[in-house]
Amino acid sequence: MEALVLEGPPMSSIEAGFGEKSRLKALLEHFSRIDDPRAPWRVAYPLPEILLLAVCGTIADCEDYEAIAAWGEARLDFLRRFQPYHHGVPSGRWLTVFMNRIPSGLFQDCFLSWVREAWPDRPELVAIDGKTSRRSHDRVLGQAPLHLVSAFATTSRLVLGQEAVEDKASELAAIPVLLERLATEGGLKGAIVTIDAIACNATIAQAVRDAGADYLLAVKANQPTLRDEIESFFTSAPPETLDHAADIDKLAQRPRPPEHGRRPPLRHQPRPQGRRTRPAALRITARHQKAGRHSQTHQHQAPQEAGRLGHRLPQRYPRR
């Protein structure tokens, strides 16, 4: 079972999530659907303590159960503000064995229902990405690393859901499944979903539209005809057809002026239903008095002003 369901800054997000007893009570209520298979007289770590530890550890950006256990040991005083933890926290190996007994679909459903109650605002920007969890393999048992496809709400810094896949080649099949689950009760309505170039195709774009969201899909070297046609637009388009915006990356202390253009759908790409515009972004950066040119090309379903669209691109991989 996957360990990552929520990410964010270490303590500030935890205080925000559990600073009120009502949110903790709601968490336990949503997870009450999970049965504890252990005999009561053998329980050293009650189920509410385990669930609280798992959620808090993942809020603190722990990427596996060993890290969650280490985080719990270091923050035991904080955890005891909400649960007694008479026996401290379990080890990472113990957590792995116990959490793997809980059906992953049930755990995700409980967690997602709690997130929607605790953070009722719909996400504005959702980044979908695949990654391999660190230290998730087992050489002794011959188990391969765990590959996850995650949906990350960048503004609230929440991982809304995940799908486990056998390998990176299986990520495409997991994205529509993840979108369908997140779209329950209008969970993605009005959001912008960003996905890397691996998912730039009509099937994924339609899955995003079916979820009630708009898409922002990267176009890279895997689609050279489409990318070349978009990039050539900057050199051939009349100035009045382009919408420009410039920005300064203050954190990196370097100029970061992106250019954004919109034009009608291009000729060489299958057209997902609902696509209206195809913006392109060209970013020029300067470091140590040497200018570098790096282009990022995207296709987008919903019309956006250049400045608003430009701020969406760096949010796909937000700084932590």
Image (spheres, grey):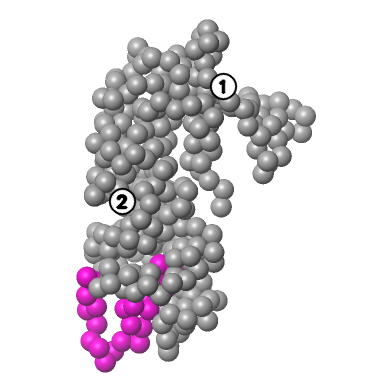
What percent of the width, then of the height, locates residue 77?
52, 81
- Secondary structure at badge 1 equals strand
Q: Which mark is residue 62?
A: none
Mark 1 or mark 2, whichever is nearer to me: 1
Q: Is residue 62 visible?
A: no
Q: Which residues are magenta?
A: 33-56
Residue type of the residue flagged with mark 1: His
Residue type of the residue flagged with mark 2: Glu
Q: Residues within 10 Å of mark 1 (few under 14, many from 20)?
A: some
Residue 44 highlighted magenta (yes or no): yes
What percent of the width, then of the height, locates residue 3?
38, 62
On the image, numbered disc 2 is attached to which residue? 163
Q: Is residue 63 above or below residue 54?
A: above
Q: Residues within 10 Å of mark 2 (few under 14, many from 20)?
A: many
Q: Earlier in the sequence, mark 1 or mark 2?
A: 2
Q: CA distance from mark 1 to mark 2?
A: 37 Å
Q: Is residue 90 above or below residue 201?
A: below
On the image, numbered disc 1 is attached to which residue? 244
Residue shown at 35%/87% (left/top)?
A: 44
* Nearer to me, 32 or 175: 32
The answer to whether residue 92 is left or right of residue 109 is: right
Residue shown at 39%/37% (left/top)?
A: 192
What percent of the width, then of the height, locates residue 107?
28, 64
Residue shown at 28%/44% (left/top)?
A: 179
